[in-house]
Image (cartoon, rainbow, N blue to C red):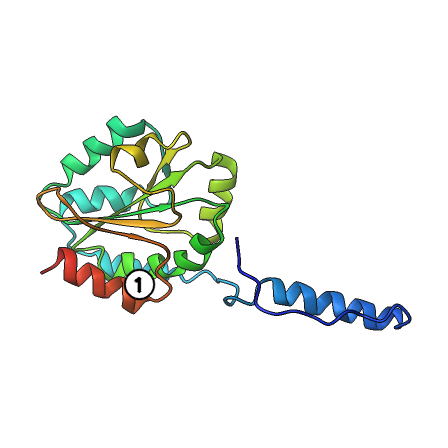
Amino acid sequence: MSRGCGKLSSVNKRVSWAARIGATIVLVGLAGCDAATPHNAAPSHGAVAVAFKGSPAPLVEIHAQANQLLGGGPAAFEARLRSLRGHPVVVNMWASWCEPCQSEFPTYQRASVAYGRQVAFLGIDAKDQNPAATLFLHRFPVTYPSYTDPSGSIASAINAYEAYPQTFFFNSQGKKVFDKAGPYLSVAELERDIRHYVLT
C-alpha cells in the first residue's frame, strides 16, 4: 500500500460546499503523492521492430508472445528457463493489485526493448486474477510474456520472497545470480543491474 505523504488540518464544519469539494480533491491528490501516476511508456511498434531485428531464435520466440499470460505452472516456467540456456534472463514478479508494480512497469517497457536482443525478459504474475492481469497488461503492454502464478508455486520454486515486485537475474548458464525485492523506479537503475549481473 502507498505510504501517507502529508496531512490536512481539520476542515471547519461551517465551510462552504465549494471548499469541501476542494478539500476532497486535495485529499485524493495526496493519496497518491508518493510518486507520479505511472503512464504507459511502451515504445512504438516501429521502434520495437528496429530494436529486435536480428534477435536470436529463442528471443524471437519470447517476442512473439509479447504481453501474453501463459499457464503451465512451475514445470512450464522451468522448461522455458532451460530453453533459454545460452542467454541471460531477467524475470519480473508482479501483480495487477500491486501499486509499486504499476510504478515499475514503465521501466520494464523501455528496458526490455533496449536489451531485448541480448536478454530474455519474462514475467511472473503472482497471486493475481487473469482478468485483472489482462487489463493491467493492456494498460502497460510489454514485449515478453508472463506466467500466471495464482498459488505462488512458481515463486516458491525460485525461492521468491513475499515481496512485490521482485526481479530475478539468471546468467546464460541458467544460474540465479541476483534478486531484488522492490521496484526499479528508473530505467538507469534497471539497466545498471542488467549490465552488472548478466552482461559482464
- How many residues crowd mark 1 within 10 Å: few (<14), some (14–19), many (20+)? few
Q: Position of residue 180 (x, y in %)?
A: 28, 53
What secondary structure is found at the residue carrying circle 1? helix
- Of residue 38 and residue 15, the one placed in the foreground of this image is 15
Q: Position of residue 132 (x, y in %)?
A: 52, 40
| Residue under pointer 1 | 47
Q: How many marks?
A: 1
Q: Is 7 situated above or below 105? A: below
Q: Position of residue 184 (x, y in %)?
A: 34, 60
Residue beneath the point at 44% across and 59% down: 103
Residue beneath the point at 80% across and 70% down: 11
Q: Is 30 situated above or below 131? A: below
Residue lying farthest to the right in this orientation: 14
Q: Position of residue 95 (x, y in %)?
A: 44, 44
Disc 1 marks which amino acid? Ala
Q: Quadrant of the C terminus?
A: bottom left
In the shown orientation, is residue 165 left or right of residue 24? left
Q: Is 92 situated above or below 77? A: below
Residue beneath the point at 33% across and 49% down: 166
In the shown orientation, is residue 80 left or right of residue 108? left
Image-quadrant location for residue 74: top left
Image-quadrant location for residue 41: bottom left
